[in-house]
Image (cartoon, grey):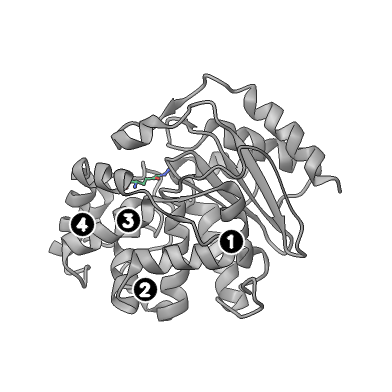
């Protein structure tokens, strides 16, 4: 299959969405990105790597980091995590507070903000440095030692993080945070503020296409754990648009408000697309269109 040619077509489809959606500005530092940037990368389990457009341009990974905190918390601590966070789609926006009250401080899933705060807390307890663990993992898998964190984005999010602080305090009031609220939030903002390119993220996610095996052949997750993480990405990775994402793209995927989406073709490849303009659910309009084109044109999806 000529993947490069299909990526070129996908980029054309993405560019046709220009002007649709809005760049996230609730974290003011995020609003400074060029709204019409677009890139897409594909990495295959057998070592092929290709990309189009701004595929080597670093962007703010935001909630895509939640995939890596989840995986590292499972790798270090196993199933204990699931006492404090569920595995059901929320059907609500990523920063919603509503379910936490009726569900006694146990977030619905690890990808909404509430659930990711719990996962960050557990990873912090397991490693002593949750944000550092995510950054180092991404550096290693992408073989990009310059991959880092944007301090301006982290500070901007902390300064405007009233909702996340409310979620964290509410979770703590139910006894579901092990660490200090401000320390946990600090790590959460730091890992959301990591910058990485489509290339970096496609490579960093490849273990999910390789049934849990890392680039160096070592095992990060058991085969069954990798299967389960892919399932949670499919059902919860794009929030209240997970149904639409499955319908259009048909792959496990994780989005971020920086405009990136990382998708997994189990057994075969990863794809990462980036375009800063978001739809109402907080998912990139261009990235979704490009991934839709890729799976539709190639017939490569899990369905
Ligand atoms: O906590 C927040 O709101 C952001 N750091 C991350 C949100 C996000 O990326 C949601 N994704 N679509």
> Residue furthest toward the front?
146
Q: Which residue is mark 2?
A: 81
Rendered view: 280 above or below 146: above
Cα distance in 3D space between marks 1 and 3: 19 Å
Q: Residue at x 62, y 76 (%)?
A: 223
Q: Which mark is residue 168?
A: 4
First of labels 4, 2 by sequence position: 2
Residue farthest top in this picture: 19
Earlier residue among tags 4 and 3: 4
Ligand 1 is found in the corner quadrant, namely top left
Looking at the image, can residue 299 be seen?
yes
Look at the numbered disc 2 and give the secondary structure of its residue. Answer: helix
Q: Which residue is mark 1?
A: 142
Percent x, y of residue 12? 70, 27
Decide: marks 4, 1 in contact (CB < 8 A)?
Answer: no
Q: Looking at the image, can residue 97 be seen?
A: no
Which of the two labelled residues, at mark 4 and mark 1, occupies the earlier sequence position? Answer: 1
- The residue labelled by disc 3 is 190
Who comes first in sequence, dot 3 or dot 2? 2
Tell me whether the residue at label 3 lies in contact with that at label 2, contact meaning CB atoms closer than 8 angstroms: no
């Amino acid at each position: 299959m000529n993947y490069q040619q299909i990526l070129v077509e996908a980029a054309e489809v993405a560019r046709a969405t220009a002007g649709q959606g809005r760049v996230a500005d609730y974290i003011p530092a995020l609003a400074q990105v060029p709204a019409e940037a677009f890139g897409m990368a594909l990495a295959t389990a057998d070592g092929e790597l290709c990309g189009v457009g701004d595929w080597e341009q670093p962007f703010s990974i935001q909630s895509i980091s939640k995939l890596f905190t989840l995986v590292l918390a499972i790798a270090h601590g196993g199933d204990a995590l699931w006492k404090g966070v569920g595995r059901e789609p929320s059907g609500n926006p990523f920063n919603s507070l509503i379910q936490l009250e009726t569900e006694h401080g146990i977030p619905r899933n690890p990808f909404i903000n509430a659930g990711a705060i719990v996962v960050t807390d557990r990873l912090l307890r397991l490693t002593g440095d949750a944000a550092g663990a995510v950054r180092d993992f991404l550096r290693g898998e992408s073989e990009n030692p310059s991959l880092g964190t944007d301090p301006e984005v982290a500070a901007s999010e902390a300064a405007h993080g009233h909702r996340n602080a409310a979620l964290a305090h509410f979770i703590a009031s139910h006894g579901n945070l092990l660490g200090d609220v401000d320390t946990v939030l600090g790590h959460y903002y730091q890992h959301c503020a990591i910058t990485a390119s489509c290339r970096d993220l496609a490579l960093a996610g490849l273990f999910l296409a390789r049934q849990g095996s890392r680039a160096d052949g070592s095992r990060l997750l058991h085969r069954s754990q990798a299967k389960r993480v892919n399932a949670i990405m499919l059902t919860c990775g794009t929030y209240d648009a997970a149904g639409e994402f499955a319908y259009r793209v048909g792959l496990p995927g994780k989005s971020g408000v920086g405009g990136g989406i990382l998708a997994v073709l189990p057994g075969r490849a990863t794809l990462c697309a980036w375009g800063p303009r978001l739809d109402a659910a907080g998912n990139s309009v261009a990235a979704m269109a490009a991934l839709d084109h890729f799976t539709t044109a190639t017939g490569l999806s899990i369905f």
